[in-house]
Amino acid sequence: MDLKIRLQLSTMMFLQYFAWGAWYVTLGTYLAALDFAGTDIGDAYSAAGWAALVSPFFVGMVADRFFAAQKVLGVLHLLAAVCLIWASTVTDTNTFFYALLLLMLCYMPTLALVNAVSFHQMKDPGEQFPNVRVLGTVGWIAAGWLVGTLDIEATALPMQIAAVASLLTGLYAFTLPHTPPRAVGQKVGVADVLGLKAMRLLADRSFAVFAFGSLLVSIPLAFYYNFANLFLNEIGMDNAAGKMTFGQMSEILFMLLMPFFFRRLGIKKMLLIGMAAWALRYGLFAAGETWVLYAGILLHGICFDFFFVTGQIYVDRRAGAEIRASAQGLVALLTYGIGALLGAKISGRVVEHFTTDTGHQWRDIWPLPAVMALVVLVLFALLFTEKNKEEDLIVSATG
């Protein structure tokens, strides 16, 4: 991969995640300013879960079979820009949900498409992809600092900024290297798209525990993704959106350190540490002191890398080459689809229950997802067995 292509792909990743990070983190704060109830905010965030359930059909049955990936990416981002502008003008709860649903139906497939465009240009994705993908995290960080510094978290401006970024991404996509449809001429069924061919892995108790544990732990995780920015703003943290990006910075750090931890801990301990970090984060948020809030934000690196990234590596090693993609698709469906959807609904109802005339009773809210995460952790510790040899897992972690 020459320098020109690497710069093209890195720019694509930066714009891709800037367009998402500009509005997603602060959406709860904006909707609360519109007097949306907790359930309404939860319903709005559930649009991403619904879209994650539909996205594999579009990518697997349409985009991968008939159209060049960079062109589909461009069209979807242009449509997303229109949806963002529309959503930024809507103040009715029902209409806003459908505007956001249309937006996420356009955006969620692009997450797979930017990866497809990148992989097609790489001789060694395991070595080259992380160096390109990290620019997506940088884009998310840049978006958070821009929105936080401008002090516009409670306004519609983040969505309008995201619309401009999505428009630029859409136009830029048509300049990217040609990426032909991957499955042209192949027969692709529902089982392939939804990862159902990997269902036989559920016959193994440990894999089943991992899969359904991932689904269950995704429920308390939604409390952070959907309501942390609103919480930090309500308690008076300055530039909350910008300071939340410390979590993405720690994510990059722990990603670099993961091979070190793999050698010493193995898969099961890393997964358990990831779950424990989520429970600890919520406990720190419940405490409410300034320094522990920063600690809770910085835990994001462990929360995300030790659970989600480690989980992807576990699936990669456990599934085998013939159903590896199907297994990853199944776990993604359980976590980003069903788990995120249930989490959005449940977190919204909990936050609404603890709503007061002056805000929310956050000290009563945060212990609940902490307990949820701890329950999953205990069940996981008791039922999950790491069968793979540690040295095999180290090879996977280090590429």
Image (spheres, helix red, strand yellow):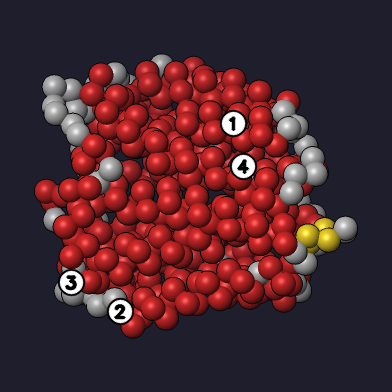
Q: Which residue is disc 2 drawn over?
A: 383
Estimate the x, y position of residue 235 in percent, counting from the top left: 81, 62
Q: Which residue is disc 1 drawn over?
A: 98
**In the figure, is residue 391 to the left or right of 92?**
left
Residue 44, disc: 4
Residue type, label 1? Tyr
Q: CA distance from mark 3 to mark 1?
A: 44 Å
Task: Categorize mark 2 by other alpha carbons within 10 Å: few (<14), some (14-19), many (20+).
Answer: few
The answer to whether residue 310 of the structure is visible from this angle is no
Q: Which residue is disc 3 drawn over?
A: 388
User: Residue at 58% of width from left, 69% of height from top?
Assistant: 369
Which mark's residue is nearer the viewer, 1 or 2?
1
User: Residue at 49% of width from left, 17% of height from top?
Assistant: 171
Q: CA distance from mark 4 to mark 2?
A: 35 Å
At numbered mark 3, what does the secondary structure look like: helix, strand or loop?
loop
User: Residue at 38% of width from left, 21% of height from top?
Assistant: 72
Which mark's residue is nearer the viewer, 3 or 1?
1
Estimate the x, y position of residue 95 in percent, counting from the top left: 66, 30
Q: Earlier in the sequence, mark 1 or mark 4?
A: 4
At numbered mark 2, what does the secondary structure look like: helix, strand or loop?
helix
Answer with the quarter of the image where residue 43 lies: top right
Residue type, label 4? Ala
